[in-house]
Image (spheres, rainbow, N blue to C red):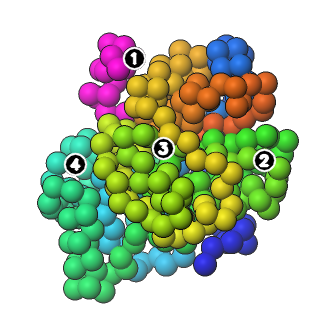
Amino acid sequence: MFSYADVRAAVPTVTRHLPPTPMWSYPVLNAAVGATVHVKHENTQPVGAFKARGALNLLASTPGRGMVTYSTGNHAQSMAWAGHLFDTPCTIVMPEGANPAKVAAVRAWGATVVLTGARLADAEAHATELAAKTGHRLVSPGDTPELLAGVGTLYEEILTARPGLEAIVVPVGSGTGAAAAAIVAEALAPRCEVIAVQSAASPAAHDSWRSGTPCVRPNETRVEGLATGRGYDLPQQILRKHLTDFVLVSDDRIAEAQRLLATTAHTLAEGAGAAALAALLEFPDRFAGREVAVVCSGGNASPAELERLGQGAGR
Ligand SMILES: *Cc1c(COP(=O)(O)O)cnc(C)c1O
Protein backbone atom coordinates (compact mmCIF):
# COMPACT_ATOMS: atom_id res chain seq x y z
CA MET A 1 0.00 0.00 0.00
CA PHE A 2 2.37 2.71 1.23
CA SER A 3 5.42 2.50 3.49
CA TYR A 4 8.51 4.43 4.54
CA ALA A 5 10.47 2.58 1.82
CA ASP A 6 8.34 4.39 -0.80
CA VAL A 7 9.37 7.74 0.69
CA ARG A 8 13.05 6.74 0.64
CA ALA A 9 12.68 5.73 -3.00
CA ALA A 10 11.16 9.14 -3.80
CA VAL A 11 14.00 11.13 -2.21
CA PRO A 12 16.47 11.01 -5.16
CA THR A 13 13.70 11.83 -7.64
CA VAL A 14 12.51 14.82 -5.67
CA THR A 15 15.97 16.19 -4.78
CA ARG A 16 17.03 16.01 -8.43
CA HIS A 17 14.46 18.69 -9.27
CA LEU A 18 13.67 20.51 -6.01
CA PRO A 19 16.23 21.80 -3.50
CA PRO A 20 15.30 21.29 0.18
CA THR A 21 13.08 24.14 1.36
CA PRO A 22 14.32 26.35 4.20
CA MET A 23 13.21 25.78 7.78
CA TRP A 24 13.75 28.73 10.12
CA SER A 25 12.91 29.72 13.67
CA TYR A 26 12.07 33.33 14.53
CA PRO A 27 12.57 34.64 18.11
CA VAL A 28 9.66 37.10 17.90
CA LEU A 29 7.34 34.35 16.70
CA ASN A 30 8.61 31.99 19.41
CA ALA A 31 7.89 34.64 22.05
CA ALA A 32 4.38 35.20 20.66
CA VAL A 33 3.61 31.47 20.74
CA GLY A 34 5.54 30.44 23.87
CA ALA A 35 7.28 27.55 22.10
CA THR A 36 10.29 26.98 19.84
CA VAL A 37 8.68 26.99 16.41
CA HIS A 38 10.42 25.85 13.23
CA VAL A 39 8.61 27.09 10.13
CA LYS A 40 9.07 24.78 7.13
CA HIS A 41 8.72 27.06 4.12
CA GLU A 42 6.93 24.97 1.48
CA ASN A 43 5.50 28.22 0.15
CA THR A 44 8.88 28.61 -1.59
CA GLN A 45 8.24 25.68 -3.96
CA PRO A 46 7.99 26.57 -7.68
CA VAL A 47 4.19 26.23 -7.57
CA GLY A 48 3.98 27.80 -4.12
CA ALA A 49 2.94 24.61 -2.31
CA PHE A 50 4.29 21.27 -1.02
CA LYS A 51 2.16 19.30 -3.49
CA ALA A 52 4.87 19.82 -6.14
CA ARG A 53 6.75 16.97 -4.42
CA GLY A 54 3.94 14.45 -4.91
CA ALA A 55 3.19 15.34 -8.52
CA LEU A 56 6.90 15.21 -9.33
CA ASN A 57 7.23 11.72 -7.90
CA LEU A 58 4.10 10.48 -9.67
CA LEU A 59 5.02 11.83 -13.10
CA ALA A 60 8.64 10.65 -12.78
CA SER A 61 7.37 7.10 -12.24
CA THR A 62 5.25 7.02 -15.43
CA PRO A 63 6.63 9.69 -17.79
CA GLY A 64 4.77 10.11 -21.05
CA ARG A 65 1.56 8.43 -19.93
CA GLY A 66 -1.25 10.97 -20.04
CA MET A 67 -2.89 11.90 -16.75
CA VAL A 68 -6.37 13.12 -15.90
CA THR A 69 -7.13 14.60 -12.52
CA TYR A 70 -9.53 16.98 -10.73
CA SER A 71 -8.83 19.81 -8.34
CA THR A 72 -9.74 23.33 -7.37
CA GLY A 73 -6.23 24.51 -6.63
CA ASN A 74 -2.70 23.50 -5.72
CA HIS A 75 -2.97 19.86 -6.83
CA ALA A 76 -3.93 21.18 -10.27
CA GLN A 77 -0.92 23.51 -10.44
CA SER A 78 1.44 20.81 -9.20
CA MET A 79 0.28 18.25 -11.78
CA ALA A 80 0.52 20.87 -14.54
CA TRP A 81 4.05 21.83 -13.44
CA ALA A 82 5.25 18.22 -13.25
CA GLY A 83 3.56 17.44 -16.57
CA HIS A 84 5.55 20.28 -18.11
CA LEU A 85 8.78 18.98 -16.54
CA PHE A 86 8.30 15.43 -17.88
CA ASP A 87 6.61 16.39 -21.14
CA THR A 88 3.52 14.45 -20.11
CA PRO A 89 0.05 15.57 -21.19
CA CYS A 90 -2.16 16.42 -18.20
CA THR A 91 -5.84 17.23 -18.25
CA ILE A 92 -7.20 18.94 -15.16
CA VAL A 93 -10.94 19.07 -14.60
CA MET A 94 -11.94 22.00 -12.42
CA PRO A 95 -15.31 23.33 -11.24
CA GLU A 96 -16.73 26.17 -13.36
CA GLY A 97 -16.31 28.65 -10.52
CA ALA A 98 -12.61 27.84 -9.94
CA ASN A 99 -10.30 30.73 -9.03
CA PRO A 100 -9.40 32.27 -12.44
CA ALA A 101 -5.83 32.99 -11.28
CA LYS A 102 -5.32 29.29 -10.56
CA VAL A 103 -6.90 28.28 -13.87
CA ALA A 104 -4.52 30.67 -15.65
CA ALA A 105 -1.50 29.24 -13.77
CA VAL A 106 -2.48 25.67 -14.72
CA ARG A 107 -2.85 26.63 -18.40
CA ALA A 108 0.46 28.51 -18.32
CA TRP A 109 2.25 25.26 -17.42
CA GLY A 110 0.74 23.73 -20.54
CA ALA A 111 -1.98 21.54 -19.05
CA THR A 112 -5.43 21.24 -20.58
CA VAL A 113 -8.14 22.67 -18.34
CA VAL A 114 -11.73 21.47 -18.56
CA LEU A 115 -14.25 23.49 -16.55
CA THR A 116 -17.41 21.68 -15.55
CA GLY A 117 -20.10 21.66 -12.89
CA ALA A 118 -20.39 23.56 -9.64
CA ARG A 119 -18.60 21.23 -7.25
CA LEU A 120 -15.43 19.16 -7.10
CA ALA A 121 -17.59 16.00 -7.17
CA ASP A 122 -18.82 17.04 -10.65
CA ALA A 123 -15.23 17.52 -11.77
CA GLU A 124 -14.34 14.09 -10.39
CA ALA A 125 -17.19 12.44 -12.31
CA HIS A 126 -16.16 14.14 -15.55
CA ALA A 127 -12.48 13.26 -15.05
CA THR A 128 -13.47 9.62 -14.54
CA GLU A 129 -15.33 9.64 -17.88
CA LEU A 130 -12.43 11.32 -19.68
CA ALA A 131 -9.95 8.78 -18.34
CA ALA A 132 -12.14 5.89 -19.49
CA LYS A 133 -12.44 7.44 -22.95
CA THR A 134 -8.78 8.37 -23.47
CA GLY A 135 -6.98 5.59 -21.62
CA HIS A 136 -5.16 8.23 -19.58
CA ARG A 137 -4.51 7.51 -15.92
CA LEU A 138 -7.12 8.89 -13.51
CA VAL A 139 -5.27 10.45 -10.58
CA SER A 140 -7.08 10.84 -7.27
CA PRO A 141 -5.64 13.75 -5.29
CA GLY A 142 -6.02 11.75 -2.07
CA ASP A 143 -5.77 8.04 -2.83
CA THR A 144 -2.60 7.88 -4.98
CA PRO A 145 0.39 6.24 -3.22
CA GLU A 146 3.00 7.97 -5.46
CA LEU A 147 1.69 11.35 -4.27
CA LEU A 148 2.07 10.35 -0.62
CA ALA A 149 5.59 9.06 -1.24
CA GLY A 150 6.67 12.33 -2.88
CA VAL A 151 5.08 14.41 -0.14
CA GLY A 152 6.86 12.26 2.45
CA THR A 153 10.20 13.77 1.38
CA LEU A 154 9.09 16.96 3.12
CA TYR A 155 9.05 15.14 6.47
CA GLU A 156 12.31 13.37 5.66
CA GLU A 157 13.85 16.86 5.32
CA ILE A 158 12.31 18.13 8.56
CA LEU A 159 13.33 15.17 10.71
CA THR A 160 16.78 14.82 9.19
CA ALA A 161 17.45 18.48 10.01
CA ARG A 162 15.82 18.33 13.48
CA PRO A 163 15.72 14.76 14.80
CA GLY A 164 14.89 16.00 18.31
CA LEU A 165 11.60 17.64 17.38
CA GLU A 166 8.79 16.95 19.84
CA ALA A 167 5.91 17.56 17.45
CA ILE A 168 5.10 18.33 13.82
CA VAL A 169 1.82 20.05 13.02
CA VAL A 170 0.41 19.37 9.55
CA PRO A 171 -2.56 21.02 7.78
CA VAL A 172 -5.05 18.56 6.29
CA GLY A 173 -7.40 18.58 3.32
CA SER A 174 -7.38 15.08 1.85
CA GLY A 175 -4.76 13.93 4.37
CA THR A 176 -1.85 12.96 2.09
CA GLY A 177 0.55 15.26 3.93
CA ALA A 178 -0.41 14.11 7.42
CA ALA A 179 -0.35 10.44 6.43
CA ALA A 180 3.11 10.78 4.94
CA ALA A 181 4.28 12.72 8.01
CA ALA A 182 3.05 10.01 10.35
CA ILE A 183 4.85 7.26 8.40
CA VAL A 184 8.14 9.17 8.22
CA ALA A 185 8.03 10.19 11.88
CA GLU A 186 7.44 6.61 12.95
CA ALA A 187 10.56 5.55 11.04
CA LEU A 188 12.89 8.44 11.94
CA ALA A 189 11.63 9.88 15.23
CA PRO A 190 9.06 7.62 16.89
CA ARG A 191 8.75 9.94 19.89
CA CYS A 192 7.84 12.93 17.70
CA GLU A 193 4.09 13.60 17.76
CA VAL A 194 2.33 14.20 14.45
CA ILE A 195 -0.71 16.42 14.90
CA ALA A 196 -3.13 17.07 12.05
CA VAL A 197 -5.23 20.23 11.80
CA GLN A 198 -8.27 21.07 9.73
CA SER A 199 -10.74 23.94 9.63
CA ALA A 200 -13.79 23.43 11.84
CA ALA A 201 -15.86 24.64 8.86
CA SER A 202 -14.74 21.62 6.76
CA PRO A 203 -14.15 18.77 9.23
CA ALA A 204 -14.53 15.70 6.94
CA ALA A 205 -11.00 14.32 7.44
CA HIS A 206 -11.09 15.05 11.16
CA ASP A 207 -14.49 13.41 11.63
CA SER A 208 -13.47 10.44 9.47
CA TRP A 209 -10.44 9.92 11.71
CA ARG A 210 -12.44 10.25 14.94
CA SER A 211 -15.24 7.95 13.77
CA GLY A 212 -13.00 5.40 12.03
CA THR A 213 -14.86 5.50 8.68
CA PRO A 214 -14.39 7.97 5.82
CA CYS A 215 -17.41 10.28 5.98
CA VAL A 216 -18.97 13.22 4.16
CA ARG A 217 -19.29 16.60 5.91
CA PRO A 218 -20.29 20.18 5.10
CA ASN A 219 -17.45 21.95 3.32
CA GLU A 220 -17.69 25.62 4.19
CA THR A 221 -14.20 26.84 5.01
CA ARG A 222 -12.89 29.80 3.03
CA VAL A 223 -9.43 28.19 3.28
CA GLU A 224 -8.94 26.61 -0.16
CA GLY A 225 -6.27 23.97 0.58
CA LEU A 226 -8.32 22.57 3.47
CA ALA A 227 -11.66 22.52 1.65
CA THR A 228 -12.62 18.90 1.20
CA GLY A 229 -16.04 17.45 1.87
CA ARG A 230 -15.09 13.80 2.36
CA GLY A 231 -12.43 11.58 3.89
CA TYR A 232 -10.07 9.73 1.49
CA ASP A 233 -9.50 6.00 2.11
CA LEU A 234 -5.74 5.68 1.70
CA PRO A 235 -4.66 8.55 3.97
CA GLN A 236 -7.40 7.68 6.48
CA GLN A 237 -6.19 4.09 6.78
CA ILE A 238 -2.70 5.34 7.57
CA LEU A 239 -3.84 8.12 9.89
CA ARG A 240 -5.99 5.71 11.89
CA LYS A 241 -2.92 3.65 12.75
CA HIS A 242 -0.17 6.24 13.00
CA LEU A 243 -1.48 9.75 13.75
CA THR A 244 -1.02 11.16 17.29
CA ASP A 245 -3.95 13.59 17.28
CA PHE A 246 -6.24 15.65 15.09
CA VAL A 247 -7.47 19.14 16.02
CA LEU A 248 -9.80 21.74 14.54
CA VAL A 249 -9.30 25.51 14.32
CA SER A 250 -11.56 28.32 13.14
CA ASP A 251 -11.02 30.22 9.89
CA ASP A 252 -10.54 33.38 11.98
CA ARG A 253 -7.73 31.75 13.97
CA ILE A 254 -6.13 30.79 10.66
CA ALA A 255 -6.29 34.42 9.51
CA GLU A 256 -4.63 35.48 12.77
CA ALA A 257 -1.83 32.97 12.13
CA GLN A 258 -1.42 34.29 8.56
CA ARG A 259 -0.88 37.80 9.96
CA LEU A 260 1.60 36.49 12.52
CA LEU A 261 3.62 34.71 9.82
CA ALA A 262 3.65 37.91 7.75
CA THR A 263 4.81 40.12 10.61
CA THR A 264 7.21 37.78 12.45
CA ALA A 265 8.44 35.33 9.81
CA HIS A 266 8.51 37.51 6.66
CA THR A 267 6.22 34.94 5.10
CA LEU A 268 3.19 35.06 2.86
CA ALA A 269 1.08 32.02 3.68
CA GLU A 270 -2.26 31.17 2.15
CA GLY A 271 -4.80 30.15 4.79
CA ALA A 272 -3.89 26.47 4.61
CA GLY A 273 -0.24 27.39 5.01
CA ALA A 274 -1.00 29.09 8.34
CA ALA A 275 -3.32 26.42 9.77
CA ALA A 276 -0.51 24.59 11.60
CA LEU A 277 0.53 27.75 13.40
CA ALA A 278 -3.16 28.42 14.14
CA ALA A 279 -3.24 25.13 16.08
CA LEU A 280 -0.40 26.39 18.30
CA LEU A 281 -2.33 29.61 18.94
CA GLU A 282 -5.53 27.67 19.67
CA PHE A 283 -3.93 25.22 22.13
CA PRO A 284 -1.04 27.13 23.75
CA ASP A 285 -0.81 24.90 26.84
CA ARG A 286 -0.30 21.83 24.75
CA PHE A 287 2.76 23.27 23.01
CA ALA A 288 4.21 25.54 25.74
CA GLY A 289 8.01 25.32 25.95
CA ARG A 290 8.21 22.55 23.37
CA GLU A 291 10.14 22.30 20.10
CA VAL A 292 7.62 22.11 17.26
CA ALA A 293 7.70 22.25 13.46
CA VAL A 294 4.81 23.89 11.63
CA VAL A 295 4.44 23.22 7.93
CA CYS A 296 3.80 26.41 5.98
CA SER A 297 2.31 24.29 3.23
CA GLY A 298 1.62 26.97 0.65
CA GLY A 299 1.63 30.65 -0.24
CA ASN A 300 -0.97 30.96 -3.01
CA ALA A 301 -3.22 33.50 -1.32
CA SER A 302 -5.86 34.90 -3.66
CA PRO A 303 -6.14 38.67 -4.21
CA ALA A 304 -9.41 38.71 -2.21
CA GLU A 305 -7.69 36.85 0.64
CA LEU A 306 -4.81 39.35 0.71
CA GLU A 307 -7.26 42.22 0.86
CA ARG A 308 -9.09 40.60 3.81
CA LEU A 309 -5.81 40.12 5.64
CA GLY A 310 -4.77 43.71 5.01
CA GLN A 311 -8.05 44.98 6.42
CA GLY A 312 -7.65 42.84 9.52
CA ALA A 313 -11.16 41.44 8.98
CA GLY A 314 -12.14 38.11 10.42
CA ARG A 315 -10.27 38.66 13.66
C1 LIG B 1 -3.52 20.52 -0.43
C2 LIG B 1 -3.03 21.45 0.60
C3 LIG B 1 -3.09 21.13 1.97
C4 LIG B 1 -3.72 19.86 2.46
O1 LIG B 1 -2.95 18.76 2.07
P1 LIG B 1 -3.60 17.29 1.94
O2 LIG B 1 -2.46 16.45 1.58
O3 LIG B 1 -4.64 17.37 0.89
O4 LIG B 1 -4.19 16.97 3.27
C5 LIG B 1 -2.56 22.03 2.87
N1 LIG B 1 -2.02 23.19 2.47
C6 LIG B 1 -1.94 23.55 1.17
C7 LIG B 1 -1.33 24.84 0.80
C8 LIG B 1 -2.45 22.69 0.19
O5 LIG B 1 -2.38 23.04 -1.10
On-image quarter of the C terminus: top left
- For image coordinates 46% across by 29% down, the residue present is 254
Vertical comparison of 263 with 51: above or below: above
CA gap between label 2 and label 3 equals: 20 Å
Q: Quadrant of residue 109?
A: bottom left
- For image coordinates 71% across by 30% down, the residue present is 287
* Circle 1: element type: loop
CA gap between label 2 and label 4 equals: 37 Å
CA gap between label 4 and label 3 equals: 21 Å
CB of mark 2 within 8 Å of CB of mark 1?
Answer: no
Which of the marked residues, 2 or 1, is nearer the chain's N terminus?
2
> From where the camera sits, is residue 199 visible?
yes
Give the left or right position of residue 206, taking residue 76 as reference: right
CA gap between label 3 and label 1 equals: 18 Å
Identify the residue under disc 2: 192
Q: Quadrant of residue 299?
A: top left
